[in-house]
Image: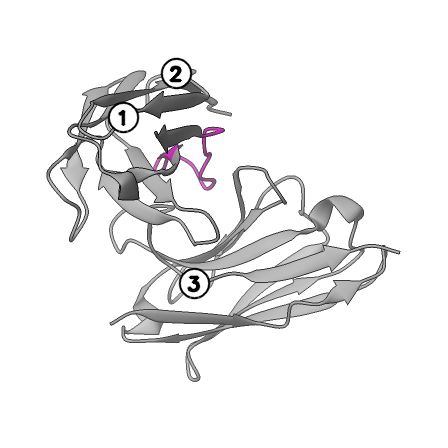
Amino acid sequence: EIMLTQSPGALSLSPGQRATLLCRASQSITNYLAWYQQKPGRAPRLLIYGASSRATGIPDRFTGSGSGTDFTLTIRTLEPEDSAVYYCQHYGLSPTGTFGLGTKVEIK
Amino acid sequence: EVQLLESGGDLVQPGGSLRLSCAASGFTFSTYAMSWVRQAPGKGLEWVSGISGSDGNTYYADSVKGRFTISRDNFNDILSLQMRSLRVEDTAIYYCVKENYYDSRRFDSWGQGILVTVSS
């Protein structure tokens, strides 16, 4: 079973700063990686799929990159509304859809 | 607009049963695979079960295999999850999720979630 490790566990940044979130897979998943954003009390929302494609309506300050085992979600110019937990997930290669444990982003 | 509305959540004793439903609208339900994803209180996301669109193939996480049954009614656009032999660790918010047409287990749209509490 493919495992996903996210780091760091939490980030505390100021508005306007850049956030860099990492996701490492235990084996190659080519580009079958998605990122989701979950705000408190809300359902998750798809941000990025195919490692680097933004989902419909996602602002371009969210950028995904990487392939194989190492992936990055970058949020440039943080805004207060970006406070959330961000999960990476691999899909498409097996019947299951494993999530990472998440990175909590706090905007100071 | 895709809408997914879960129902059936409740407080149930360990060993009990519960059936969740999800009413789907805004898309051609029968052509899309669907899944249930859960989130225990204060924890991360866990994929629970999935079902393909037309042929009805089903898939389960090891944690629920043999206890949960996923099904769909393509005539009434309803996704269901029958849960039996419930355990305290099944306590979670359960999300009904629409998968991407081309990529299995890529979750494009989510319901608002429904709470299942297993406690004595």
Q: CA distance from mark 3 to mark 2?
A: 31 Å
Q: Earlier in the sequence, mark 2 or mark 1?
A: 1
Tell me, yes or no, whether the two marked residues, 2 and 1, touch with CB atoms within 8 Å: no
Where disc 1 sits, the SS reads loop
Specify the subunit that label 1 lies on: A
Q: Is residue B67 left or right of residue A47?
A: right
Q: Is residue B117 left or right of residue A95?
A: right
The boundaries of the magenta stretch are A87-102
**Are the residues tagged 3 and 2 within 8 Å (C-beta)?**
no
Residue B39, placed above or below residue B114:
above
Mark 2, other Cα within 10 Å: few <14 / some 14–19 / many ≥20: few
Task: Indicate yes or no whether the magenta region holds residue A95.
Answer: yes
Q: Position of residue B22 (x, y in %)?
A: 50, 71
Q: Tell me the subunit letter for badge 3.
A: B
Q: Secondary structure at mark 3?
A: loop
Identify which amino acid the numbered label 1 is placed on: Ser
Residue designated by label 1: A14
Q: Which residue is mark 2?
A: A27
Q: Is residue A33 above or below residue B4?
A: above
